[in-house]
Structures are given as structure tokens and as C-alpha cells.
Image (cartoon, rainbow, N blue to C red):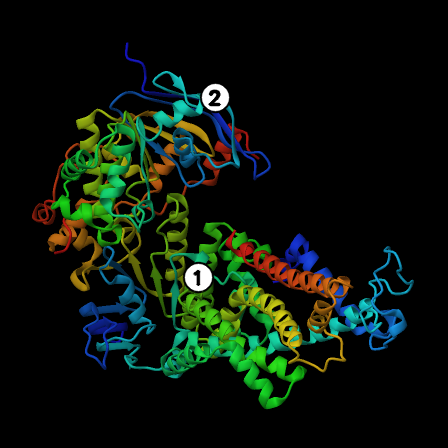
Amino acid sequence: MADELLTARGIDLTYGGNRLFGGPGLKVLHGVDVTIRRGETVGIVGESGSGKTTLGRALLRLVDVSAGEIRFDGQDITRARDGQMRPLRRRMQMIFQDPMASLNPRHSVRRILVEPILLHRLASNGREAEARVLKILDRFTLPRAVLDRNPHELSGGQRQRIGIARAALLEPDFVLADEIVSGLDVSTQAQVLNLLRDLSRDMGLAMAFISHDLSVIRAVCDRVYVMRLGKVVEEGRCEDVFAAPKSEFTRALLDAIPLPEIDPGWLARKSPLEEAAAAESLPP
Amino acid sequence: MTRSLLSIAGLSAVSDRDRGAPILRKVALALERGEVRGLVGESGAGKSTIAKALLGILPRTVRVTGGTIRFEGRDLLTAPAAVLRQIIGSEISLIPQDPQTALNPGRRIEAQLTDGLRLRRGMSAREAHARALTLLEEVHIREPDRVLRAYPHELSGGMRQRVLIASAFALEPKLVIADEPTTALDATVQKQILRLIRGMQKAHGTGVVFVTHDLGVVAQICDSVTLLYAGQVIEEGRTADVLASPQHPYTKALIAAGPRYDRPDAGLKPVPQAVFDQLRAEIGIT
Amino acid sequence: MGRSFRAALCDPKVIFGCGFILVLIVLAIFAPWIAPQDPLEQNLMLGTLPPAGFVDAEPGYWFGTDDLGRDVLSRLIYGSRIALTVAFIAAGLAALVGTTLGLLAGWYRGWVETVITRLVDIWMAFPPVLLSTLLVAVFGSGLHSVIAAIAIIDWTRFCRVVRSETMAQASMDYVTAARTIGFSRFRILVSEILPNVAPVLVALVSLEMGIAVIVEAILSFVGLSVSSDTPTWGGMIAQGRQIIYQGWWVMVAPLVMLLLTVLAFNQLGDGLRRALDPMMRR
């Protein structure tokens, strides 16, 4: 499996829980298996509480898993400490949902983009680093003037592009995109998705694209994992899963999406899962 | 000849904070009784501003510079405060966007549902309680008495939104403003809530102004739609017409820009700069 | 960062606070040249003279004299030396210790946090007045004891606030982003978290300086501060209280000075916090 870049097998993740006093904690991931190959874009889709965001962070070793194995480029990183991870960090990057929250408001854009380059010695001095930054700004159609600004002085679309640029500048092998287009206008969303697709093609990036929106997943992903309550309920190539979903949950997710065409039966049509939960109630 | 329920004409507003930058440009919008009209636009298009104007809660930094908002023939912009107080909350109500923040975390659901009933309809505690139970049943909440006793944090997002919908319809309003009521919800929950809103609206004959940025939602529950850009109405009409044969290039581009799970090539066509240039020229923005 | 400081300088509160304190600093440093009289010189012939403008006022003694004939204005000016010394050093020490421990507790968590928070809880259980009198008893009265007392008692205030602010910062996505990039934990603490904790810290330090001035005044009022010869505002208030009917100005002048100084520190802190923070929030 030489083309497998990032693999996760049997991942369990439990939050909280008190080892001393035996409290149970909350199990957020149950036996999750995920494989991401070089150059492919994998979608991870689910509703809130599905565990998709936690899975993403587990893959990047931002949180510890309770059981299972994670391998990056053949290397076992399941229990890797910060020191071990540091050389690998350059190769696995992340783009966040809210660029307002993921760009330090007290740093200039220049600082945000240049420091990582210098940290990983992709340039030997500030001037070289800035040259690289300027090149990518051009590619992302961002004016040079943004370098001197702080994130809150820019538009949402610009901020999102800077978040992507920050990840791309390190020339990683793998990028995790966590709900990066949720909350963007349809037109900006299309721009960002295009950018991402071109980037991934040019750099041969492997990508994990987390989203709650199956339509967006369809636009950018080769394969998809459908998650529900911490488990993977379906996976496969996008065209297969979308054309003939095997899991009832996937069918329910697809059915719930309103298309911009009049469909008189859509509203009344209930998925089998919905029939089962006819009315909402409080937990006992 | 039935008078329109709602008729907005020539509504213009500017932002005092932004050196008089226009927020709304001569907006016109009409709503009949029992009609659901979608108010669509990207962020900053002005749809929230219109919703706030209808509810009389425009921020102080926004100034109306012209136009009328006729609700059942009466201009809300010039009506005396006492009349407005009578109308807003009773004949015009709101389904808010965020179920998290719209409910007071320190009060039980019953208190928040019965506030309006007791204050506006003079019901006693017992009468209001009974009516609240009925309302919760209408929005398909099982064990309504338990829910009434509960606090907001004990309910799921979907349940909270149902409570808010119940609250919006409690006083039998003639017009409901739904301000992106499903944006914060999962898709499966969204569908249930949309179904609920459509059902309640049809059952009570209420007119709805449905603010959203999602053309899919518009297609499925709105009878008519108004599309805004930079505070100006770009296109409007019956939903079926606008979506099947859009007239303005912006409308066409917007429809084409949205991703679709049934089409792998959709979702990667941003609105072309030429369309934006044309829009700006038409509206008169530099 | 520069831009927000420039904005801060335009805020009226900051202008007032900063201006007043700068004046005080000038007075303190150049006291020997500015003060019209020798603050320690006693002259019973000129005892209890009223301030300028009143009947019997003596030229050259603008705020009058106390019962020992010492010039009130000069003593006020010299008193600012004590006040400012205590304000800057005591508040500075308390801030340094409290902030360091707060940052460590909030960022590294685990046993570090447990130890530090327990320490703070226990420390705060001690009655502060008891602690300061104890310190003075051990180290003897004097400025060093006053400064030590303030720092030792008030560091916990900084620790608590900085810890909770650090924890709030640690959950921000830009901290997570810094981790994914591979910065060391220490680097993240200093370059991502600390700059965002700074606004709160600045406000707290200014507030603390005002508190330090008052505490010093209280301690010198009860005679636990520097020797009674050295002019301090608290000491002046104590002395003035005894002759309040014969010479009200002896007590009122230092009282007003105290008020204005604490007000200045508070306004400065308030203005700085608001100028540094909402810049980002907007």
C-alpha cells in the first residue's frame, strides 16, 4: 500500500473520564477506519455530533486517541509526543472553518505567513521567505498590501484565502480542511473550492475535507466517509455512494437537501429514519 | 379585492456609521395573505435589514430615508409608537435565526411561551398553560408538559426551534418573519423544521417573509421570491418562474454557482466578475 | 500592535490618566528643583498658615503649612516619590509573579495547574491585613516592607485573571493552528497567547497601581510605612486629621492628591483596555 499516506485503524476516542475515580467520560469515536491515499481528496461528512471534527483532529494528532493506530507515510504516530511530531508537522497541515478565529488578531498577515516558513527552514532569511509569500499571494489574487494588515481588516473571503495560503506555503503532503466553506456565500464558496482543487492538483496534495454539506463534498471529493454518532456508516467512491447509497442514513442525508428546483413531493417525503422518530422528545 | 397583507414601496435606508452608505435602495416587496415569500441574497445584501425594519428593530445607526411599509394598509414607518407596540409581537412575529440565543437560559420554556399569551391576551396562568400545551403538540413535541417544565439547555437545537416556532404562532399573527430559521440546524432537522413552518403557515393562513441565502430552501417552501444585491431588488416573481427561467444574469449565475449532490460539476462556478460589474453599473455603485 | 497604541493615545481617558501620571513622575524626579520649600524644614513661627488666597496666607507657601510650619505643597510633591515608587514597584512585582504563574497554570495545565491553583486558594484565605502587619513586624517598617506586603498579597489577583484568560486563549483556533504548524509550546505561549492576554493585564496593572498607592497611604496613616519624617500622603492625612479644625488644608490637600492619582491610574487602565481590545473585536 505504498500510495497510502494517512491511515487510521480502529480509532476509539473518549473525552473526559477520570482514571482515578473511574468516571466513564464520553465516547466520541467508535472503531473508525479511514484511509487517505496520496493525491486524493476524501470527504468526511456527518451532522453535528457525528465525530467528524474530532476525527480530523485525531488524524493530525491534536488530540490523543484512546485506542487504535494512526500511521503517516508508514510511520506509527499514534502516541507520538510533540517532539516526534515536529518534523512531520510541516507535512500535515490544517485549514480552519473560521478564519477570524484561526488567524491571530494581533499578528500582521506578514508575520502569520512568514514565521512558519522560517520555522521549517524553507527559506534561510526573512527576505527569501517573503518572496515565497508574495508568489502565493499572486496566485491567490491577494494584493501585496494585505501583508501589512491585521486579519480583522480584511474581508471574509480574503481571510479564508490567507488561511489556505498559510497551509500551502509549507508544501505539505496532506491537508485537513475543516468545514472551510460553511458560512461562506455561494459565490465565495465556489471561488475557495476552485482554489483548493487547483492547489491540490498542482501540489499533489492528499486532502481530508470535513463538511456537513453533501453537495459540497460532491463537488470536490473523490471518496467519502459518512459518519453518524462516532461511527463510519458508509464509505466509497463519491459517484457510487451518491448514485446508490447503501446506508439508510446516507439516504436520509441526501433526501434532506433541498435542490433549487421545484419538487412538489420533497417536503412531504419522509426518509425511513424520520418515520422512526415521528415526534421530538426529551431524553428520559 | 383583497388588500395586500404587506406592501413595501421605495424603501431606502443608509448607514450613519458608514458615512451615509446606502443599505437599501428603493426596495419594493408585496405579500398576500397566506403567501410565503423568500427574501434571498448574499451576506450584506440587505435582507436582514428589511426584516428588522418590518419588526421595528432597526439599529440606531441605520436611518430610513424614504419609502413606506404598509401592513394591512397602515404605514409602519409613520405609525405612532402605541400602534406599533400593538402590532409587533402580536400581528407580526419573528422566528429567529439562532435557537441557542433566542431563549433565555435562566427561564423555563413555559415562562417564555406563556409571556405573550398572558400579557397580550390577558389569559390566566392556567389558560396560558393549556394553550402552551396545545401549541407544543402542534409543533410535534412529545411530552409537552415535560418540555414546558424544562430549561432551554435541556433541549436539542431542533426542539428549541420548534418551541420558537410555537411561540411565533402563539398569538395567531397575520405575518411571520422567519429570519434564516434553519441556518444553524443540521440538514435532516432543517427539513423537519421547514415542513413544520409550511404546515403551520398553511393551517393558520399566515403570510411569511422567509429570509435565507439558500435557493434550495426557497424552491421547496416559498411561493414567491425576491432576490437582493447591495440593497436593491434584482429580480422577483413566483419561485417556479424565477428558478426555471431567471431573467437577470446575476440570478442565473447564482443558481449555477451552488453545489448539487446530483451533479459532480456543480459548485465550482463563481459568479463572474462581469456580472458584478454589470450589477454595479445598473445600481450605480463605483 | 503599533496601530492600536496610537488609537489608545487618542482616548480621552488615556490622555487624562497618562498626563496626570507623567506630571507626577516629573514632580517626583525633579522634586528638589520644583518644590518651593524644604519639606522637612520646621518653622513654628509659620505654623498652620492657610493656603494662598486666604487671610494670613504667607507668600511662597501655596498650600499653607502644617502645625510644625512645614510647607504642604512641598511635602505633597515629595510625597509623590513614595507613592509612585510603591505604585510601580509593588504593582510590577505582583504582576510579574502573578502573570507568570497564571500563564503556566493556564497553558501547561496538569499538575502544574493543580499546584498553582491550590496555592492561590490557600494564599487568598489569609486575611491580608494580618499578613501585612506580620510582614512589617518581621522586616520592620519601611518602604521595602510596604512594597513586599502589597506584592505578596496581590499577586493572586493577577494569577487568577491571567490563568482564566490564558485558558480562553488556548481554546482559540489560532492556537490550534500554531500547534499544527509545529511551534513549540513555549513559543506559542509567548507569541500567540501573551499578546492577547496583554489588554486585560494592562488594565489590571493600572488598577493595581492605584490600589498600591492607597495601601501605602493606609499603612503610612497608621505609621507602618516609612519614618514619619519622610513626607507621605498617608502620613500627612494622619497628621492633618489631628488639626482638622485649625488647618483643614493639611488633610484635604493630600486627600485630593490621592484621589486624583488613583483616578488617573484607573482611567488610564480603563482607557487602555478599551482601546487595545475592541480594536480587535470590531
Residue identified by numbered label 2: B67
Q: Foreground: B265 or B109?
A: B109
Label 1 neighbourhood size at 10 Å, few (<14), some (14-19), many (20+)?
many
Q: Residue at x 12, y 42 (%)?
A: A270
* Mark sitting on residue A102: 1
Q: Position of residue B207 (x, y in %)?
A: 27, 26
Q: Can the viewer see residue A260 in this picture?
A: no
**Residues flagged by tags 1 and 2 on a common chain:** no
Compared to C75, does B133 lie above or below?
above
Q: Position of residue B254 (x, y in %)?
A: 37, 38
Dot 1: element: helix
Dot 2: element: strand
B28 left or right of B281 in image: left
Q: Can the viewer see residue B23 in this picture?
A: yes
The quadrant holding residue C83 is bottom right
B14 left or right of A212 in image: right
Kindly report which numbered mark, 1 or 2, lies closer to the viewer in this rendering: 2
Q: Given the image, on which type of amino acid does mark 2 rest?
A: Gly
Q: Given the image, on which type of amino acid does mark 1 rest?
A: Ser
Residue at the limit of the structure toward the right, as seen here: C59
Label 2 neighbourhood size at 10 Å, few (<14), some (14-19), many (20+)?
some
Q: Quadrant of the C terminus of chain A?
A: bottom left
The quadrant holding residue A205 is bottom left
Q: Foreground: C156 or B152?
A: C156
Q: Position of residue A175 (x, y in %)?
A: 36, 66
B10 left or right of A13 in image: right
What subunit carries mark 1? A
Q: Position of residue C40 (x, y in %)?
A: 83, 77
What subunit carries mark 2? B
